[in-house]
Amino acid sequence: MDDNALLLHRSRRRALVTGAGGFIGGHLVRHLVEQGYGAVRAVDIKPLDAWHQRHAAAENSSLDLARIEAAHEACDGPTDVFNLAADMGGMGFIETQRRACMLNVLINTHLLMAAQAHGVERFFFTSSACVYPDYRQDRVDVDALAETDAYPAMPEDGYGWEKLFGERMCAAFADEGGPVTRVARLHNVYGPLGAWDCDRTKAPAAICRKVAQAVVSGDHTIEIWGDGEQTRSFTWVDDCTRGIVAIHESDCTVPLNLGSSEQVTINQLVTIVEAIAGVTLKRRHNTEAPLGVRGRNSDNTFIRQQLDWAPDTSLRDGLAQTYAWILEQVRATTTARAAATEVV
């Protein structure tokens, strides 16, 4: 499909983005609007004033999609569903809130049922690298994870099992009269306009916050979870949203990795942010903190074959933008707290 035909095609599509008040969802709504989708409906369980982003070009509403009635309301009209809705967060959340993570199955199940009932044509499910077995991620020098490595299954307890079940549910609906389904396994997405100071904060934002707090306070120390030698790859949010749309519109019927293949240790991640901030901090390692798997990286061979593309924004470039935004938040919060103290 050439560019003009693609623009015309998108102008006739009506998209539903669930989890639109969250970090990735807010960026995806913006991306769909910019890519020329004819209408975008944005839905999240949070009150509108608690969303990370709201876009005037979208129809924004607060609905609890774990309720079947709300799922039907949301799916009445759209041609395309992008399901990003989930109760989740960083490692501190998913290791201690397994019940909440498992209950996300209600959202995807109800949305698939409603999507089929209302004639939705395409359904995108946001899966996770947490579907991969622990036994393939028990070394820092881990082999990059290929899509076929998900089986034999032994995903991360709670969140990983729910995501793997969601993948199977999508395949079953697609095989038995439901909408066409597409699945991406996201790997550690980061960027501005997300959680940065709570138990849902992921590693890049948490490290940026800790460095920014050290800079603002003058206390040049930082706590690192674990020994810092655990390895990860981190995906720039704009690469993620571009990949979501490309996978959704593709002919690929099986799950695809959507992640950077630039692997670093957490200690190296800290060093990069220190260099961006122009500071060197004294490191304290908390070996009692939640750690997750020992090593994880994305094998992008298959996505390159399918899309002739893979995430390519360097970690240094993405972190520079993320740190700049989080530094603003830390400064604003520090100023507000100081003002409140003076009033008291």
Image: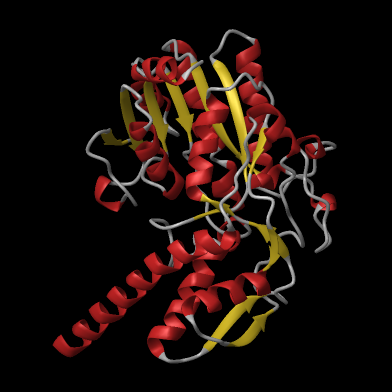
Q: Residue at x 44, y 19 (%)?
A: 6
Q: Does 90 appear above or below 45? A: below
Of 233 and 286, nearer the camera is 233
Q: How many marks?
A: 0
Q: Quadrant of residue 62?
A: top left
Q: Quadrant of residue 255?
A: top right
**x and y percent of residue 31 in the render?**
39, 37
Question: Which image quarter holds the C terminus?
Answer: bottom left
**x and y percent of residue 112 in the render?**
52, 22
Of 152 and 180, nearer the camera is 180
Q: Residue at x 36, y 74 (%)?
A: 330
Q: Does 233 appear above or below 221? A: above
Answer yes or no: is residue 44 visible: no
In the image, is 177 to the left or to the right of 198? right
Colouring style: secondary structure
In the picture as drawn, the residue positioned furthest to the left comes out as 343
Q: Does 218 appear above or below 286? A: below
Answer yes or no: is residue 29 visible: yes
Of 232 and 162, nearer the camera is 232
Q: Quadrant of residue 299?
A: top right
**x and y percent of residue 20 in the render?**
38, 40
In the image, is 121 to the left or to the right of 314? left
Q: Residue at x 56, y 87 (%)?
A: 281
In the image, is 331 to the left or to the right of 254? left
**x and y percent of residue 306 in the render?**
68, 27
In the picture as drawn, the residue positioned furthest to the top comes out as 177
Q: Residue at x 63, y 40 (%)?
A: 310
